[in-house]
Each structure stands twice: as C-alpha cells, then as structure tokens.
C-alpha cells in the first residue's frame, strides 16, 4: 500500500512532494521503490529529520520496534497499518500528531479512496490539514468512526481485489466465446468504470432494472448468479476479511 501511495504522489504533477524518502527493515524494497518513483532510500532513523509527514506501513507486530528506531521527535504520522487502533498508535508514538487511515490500491492512479479516523483534539489544525491534504492528492478522503474503520476496510480496501476477480472472469468468458483477450479486457474495464459513475446517480436496484428487461439476456444472467449464490459469496468474503483483521 505504501508503494501505491508513493506512485500516486509521484504522478501528482505540480502537487508532487518536493522529495520522498523510503526505509525498510532490510528487504531492499525501499531502494527499489525509490529508484522507481525518483526518491531516496535511507535508514529508518533518518526519516524524522527529513520528513514533513511520515507514512507508517509496517506489520502491526513491528510497531514498538519502529517507534524505538524513529525516536521521540516526530513529524505528523499517517498510519496505514490495518487493525491497529488510534489509542495503540498514540501509546507507541506519544506526543506525535497521528492520523489512522486506510487507503485502497487505486491511490496509485490518484483515484483512490482513503478512510480515516479524525485525529484527537490535541492534534493542531495545521497538522490535520497537512495530513488530510496529502491523502486528498490520491483521491477521496472520508472520515469514519474508529468503530467503523475495520468494516470500511473490508468493503473499500479489500474490494478492489474482488472487483478485479469479477473483471477477469467476465473478460475470460468473453475471450472463450471468441473475442480477442485484450479487447475483452478493455470492454469490461470501461464498463466497470462507466457503471461506477452511473451508481453515483442511480441506486443499484435502478441500474439492475434498467439493464435487465423481463425475459431478456441480463435477467437470465442474474438468475444464474443467484443460483450460484454470488451475494452470499460476497458477504462471506467481507466476513472473512473482518475475522482476519480482528483476530
């Protein structure tokens, strides 16, 4: 996710950050990402003195080790670590302005969605605006309650993978019926993009009704999806994601 965010910021034109620095625990990913987007790989301990904002994207089991490496004097922190509460973050990074946020992978193309827990009152207005402004460079940023963020993650951060699976299945079905694979992919992707815009103006039921005339081909397809329990499968996917996050 950090890589997707970095790619989005790198493509932001005039709004691109003046500089980006990356650090890891020895995997080499920081250097590879820095080379890709035009940043610099540095040691973890160097980050606080070089950054206006730090994005925390580590495993939740590594938080205390990270806090020790970063030290006490910290710039505003945006945590994209799933399953780690704002209280836990404040415990690990006392005194730092902290924003708990979860983006989805579309931030890479600056059409993403990020949900965030509004920071606690002691965070200055300036720090708040700086962090939210950085997220808004990558797409929409929507505040949610702490109690809602896990569910929000399950339906907006996990779901690009589910939608990609649906796209792949539709395109593969088209290719099997004789359409060239690249064309099938393009047709489905443009249809998904257009449907997303339509759903801003019309309810899902209205869209289904508009497309599925009685006795028609779409109605037959919807009945097949009902028989294969598509809705139940999606609900099960959300439940499984939540169970893993909460576990």
Image (spheres, rainbow, N blue to C red):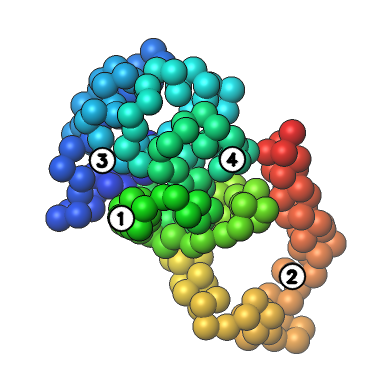
- Of badges 2 and 4, nearer the viewer stands 4
Query: Whole-Å distance between the Cαs marked 2 and 1?
Result: 50 Å
Instruction: Give me the residue at 59% from left, 40% from top.
Output: 87
Q: Which residue is nearer to you in this view: 55 or 213? A: 55
Q: Tell me the tag on residue 54.
A: none
Query: Whole-Å distance between the Cαs marked 4 and 1?
Result: 21 Å
Question: Which mark is first along the chain, 1 or 4?
Answer: 4
| Position in image of residue 183 (x %, y %) | 42, 58
Question: Which mark is first along the chain, 1 or 2?
Answer: 1
| Relative to 44, residue 245 above or below | below
Query: Whole-Å distance between the Cαs marked 3 and 4?
Result: 22 Å
In the picture of the structure, the residue carrying the numbered disc 3 is 52
Camera sees residue 180? no
- Of badges 2 and 1, nearer the viewer stands 1
Question: Which mark is first along the chain, 2 or 3?
Answer: 3
In the picture of the structure, the residue carrying the numbered disc 1 is 126
Query: Whole-Å distance between the Cαs marked 3 and 2?
Result: 50 Å
Q: How many marks?
A: 4
Determine the image quadrant of residue 231.
bottom right
Image quadrant occupied by the N terminus: top left
Camera sees residue 51? yes
In the picture of the structure, the residue carrying the numbered disc 2 is 222
Answer few, some or many: residues within 10 Å of disc 1's Cα (few below 14, many 20 plus, some between 14 and 19).
few
Question: Which mark is first along the chain, 4 or 3?
Answer: 3
Q: Secondary structure at mark 4?
A: helix
Image quadrant occupied by the C terminus: top right
Answer few, some or many: residues within 10 Å of disc 2's Cα (few below 14, many 20 plus, some between 14 and 19).
some
In the picture of the structure, the residue carrying the numbered disc 4 is 87
Question: Which mark is first along the chain, 1 or 3?
Answer: 3
Query: Whole-Å distance between the Cαs marked 2 and 4?
Result: 45 Å
């Amino acid at each position: 996710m950090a890589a997707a965010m970095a790619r989005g910021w790198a493509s932001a034109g005039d709004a691109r950050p003046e500089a980006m620095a990356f650090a890891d625990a020895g995997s080499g990913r920081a250097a590879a990402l820095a080379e890709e987007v035009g940043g610099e790989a540095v040691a973890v301990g160097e980050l606080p003195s070089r950054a206006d904002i730090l994005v925390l994207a580590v495993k939740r089991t590594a938080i205390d080790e990270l806090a020790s490496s970063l030290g006490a004097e910290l710039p505003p922190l945006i945590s994209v670590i799933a399953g780690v509460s704002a209280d836990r973050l404040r415990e690990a990074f006392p005194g730092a302005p902290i924003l708990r946020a979860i983006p989805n992978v579309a931030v890479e193309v600056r059409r993403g969605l990020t949900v965030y827990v509004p920071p606690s009152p002691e965070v200055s207005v300036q720090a708040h605006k700086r962090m939210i402004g950085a997220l808004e460079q990558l797409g929409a940023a929507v505040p949610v309650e702490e109690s809602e963020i896990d569910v929000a993650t399950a339906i907006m951060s996990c779901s690009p993978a589910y939608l990609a699976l649906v796209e792949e299945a539709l395109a593969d079905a088209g290719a099997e019926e004789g359409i060239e694979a690249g064309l099938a992919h393009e047709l489905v992707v443009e249809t998904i993009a257009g449907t997303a815009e339509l759903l801003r103006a019309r309810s899902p039921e209205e869209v289904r009704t508009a497309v599925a005339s009685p006795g028609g081909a779409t109605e037959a397809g919807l009945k097949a999806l009902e028989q294969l329990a598509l809705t139940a499968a999606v609900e099960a996917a959300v439940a499984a994601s939540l169970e893993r996050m909460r576990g």
